[in-house]
Amino acid sequence: MLKYRGLALCLALGGCAHLDVQLASFMTPDRGTRTAKLAPGYVVENRALVHEGQSIGITYAHHSESQAVIFFCGGDTFHRSIEGGEALEALALDSDVVLFDYPGYGETTGSPSVGSILDTALEVYDYICSLESTQNKKRVHYGFSMGGLVAAQLAQERRADGVALEATPPSVRRWADSRIPLLLRPMTEVRIEPQLASIDAAAALKHFRGKVLLLVSPADEIVPARVSVEMERHLRGAGRDVTLVGFPNRRHGAIDRAPEFPATLRRFLQQARPLP
């Protein structure tokens, strides 16, 4: 989006105009993990795991006095080298943070599929939880957008003391339905690839024993807040410990930059209790 600066109309003098066009109007620098500005005491390590002949790029930010480990599952276009710094700054609030690239993205090799993404998440989780620095710390899965579906599935397979889902639909089908105007739904057939249709965050968390946090915004143009409200009702009806927090005027991907976000996340981390 172009930035217009110094536009001066001098019609009385015969008409003149000035338009300044700057490179920054078109290109902005990546916010990779090395750009993150964290509290003193944090150590940020970029590592590469090898699993079944393929490489997995991960970032592990840790602090000796942290009480929790947050496993972050990014959205469908997440790259540590592009958005990793922002994720670390948002989530490293007295907690360790783990980021990883999905298969075929960034420094992780292979091809993306539902199976390969979940396998990668499991491999990263198992590796991090084998480290001495993560022992006796709470384990929290945090998913953004479609990454929330990954975080919920991961909670079915591995211990999580809490699950936080930011702008996450209950399922791919429910998200697809929400994108179709009400008047067009009777005449619109939604076709979803079988492997995507099988992913259901609400179903994955139906028997989850930890605390669930849903972060939504009425201004979200990609994942309507109402679908998260539906998931809250579903989980509450199943007897789950779920809290929904709304952030007004925050577009998709901007909730973690809201002034009230740090206090919301810290409160959730404090309330989460370690599970056996």
Image (tube, grey):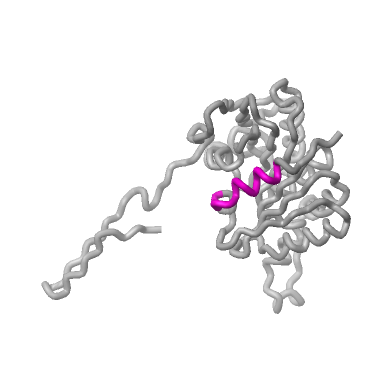
Q: Residue 35: where, in percent of width, then height?
A: 48, 35
Residue shown at 75%/45% (left/top)? 163
Residue shown at 71%/47% (left/top)? 164
Q: Residue 148: where, in percent of width, then height?
A: 71, 48
| Vertical placement of residue 92 versus 40, above or below | below
| Vertical placement of residue 108 versus 182, above or below | above
Q: Which residues, given as a range, are shown in magenta?
A: 257-269
Which is nearer the eye, 54 or 127? 127
Figure quadrant of the N terminus:
bottom left
Which is nearer the eye, 269 or 176? 269
Which is nearer the eye, 211 or 122? 211
Q: Residue 59: where, in percent of width, then height?
A: 61, 31
Which is nearer the eye, 197 or 169? 169
| Residue 37 visible in image | yes
Residue shown at 59%/64% (left/top)? 219
Figure quadrant of the C terminus:
top right
